[in-house]
């Protein structure tokens, strides 16, 4: 028998209210904990949660995304979160709305989530890499293709020497 986490949406927050049955040894979010959108989406998609809205109505995964998913970024973030959880990683929402965090015993990773064919400004990516390194994270970029497949790239910052404009003859 699988336990279902009971989540209530109230005051613009998703809060864990309890759980039913036995969990089969898996981690249960603590009662009273406020969950991020992507965590709720994962629990609903894997049928490990029930979500009750302020009006008392239960929402399934599709209804949840229709009501709260709003933009394409939500789907992309969910695709990467789901992929990482499926691979057995302990992942949590990141510092910004476009990243996720994986913390292992040996290293912590920050993953910038984007979609293929999305134009990113180099300055934005460089600032994100610098911020990740400054906070002690190993930076990665996750690119989601049109089929929902995710490819991960490890990124780093390098400094290139300035080349003199004089040409020696």
Image: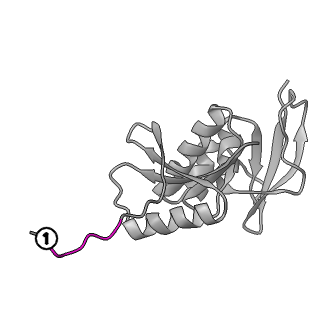
Q: How is colour applied across the structure in the image?
A: one colour
**Residue most extreme to the bottom:** 166
Quick one: which residue is furthest to the top in this view?
1
Q: Position of residue 29 (x, y in %)?
A: 84, 47
Q: Residues within 10 Å of mark 1 (few under 14, many from 20)?
A: few
Q: Quadrant of the N terminus?
A: top right
Q: Position of residue 38 (x, y in %)?
A: 64, 51
**What residue occupies the far front of the structure in this picture?**
169
Q: Which residue is mark 1?
A: 168
Q: Residue at the spot x=72%, y=41% of the render? A: 90
Q: Is residue 96 visible?
A: no
Q: Quadrant of residue 82?
A: top right
Main SS of the magenta part reads loop
Residue at point 57% right, 47% down?
A: 78
Q: Which residues are magenta?
A: 161-168
Element carrying mark 1: loop
84 left or right, relative to 9: left
* Quadrant into which the C terminus falls: bottom left
Q: Residue at x 72, y 67 (%)?
A: 12
Residue 161 visible to the viewer: yes
| In the image: residue 6, left or right of residue 167 | right
Q: Give the image location of residue 73, x and y in percent.
A: 49, 56
Percent x, y of residue 147: 40, 36
116 displayed left or right of 18: left
Q: Is residue 94 magenta?
A: no
Residue under the point 46% across and 55% down? 72
């Amino acid at each position: 028998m699988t336990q279902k986490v009971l989540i209530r949406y109230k005051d613009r927050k998703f809060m864990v209210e309890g759980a039913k049955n036995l969990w089969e040894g898996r981690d249960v979010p603590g009662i009273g904990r406020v969950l991020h959108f992507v965590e709720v989406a994962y629990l609903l998609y894997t049928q490990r949660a029930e979500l009750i809205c302020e009006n008392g109505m239960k929402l399934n995964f599709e209804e949840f995304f229709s009501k709260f998913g709003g933009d394409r970024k939500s789907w992309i973030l969910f695709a990467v979160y789901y992929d990482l959880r499926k691979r057995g990683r302990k992942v949590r929402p990141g510092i910004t709305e476009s990243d996720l965090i994986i913390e292992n015993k040996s290293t912590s990773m920050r993953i910038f989530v984007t979609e293929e064919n999305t134009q990113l400004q180099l300055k934005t990516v460089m600032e994100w890499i610098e911020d990740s390194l400054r906070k002690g994270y190993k930076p990665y970029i996750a690119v989601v293709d049109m089929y929902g497949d995710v490819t991960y790239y490890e990124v780093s910052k390098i400094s290139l020497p300035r080349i003199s404009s004089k040409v020696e003859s």
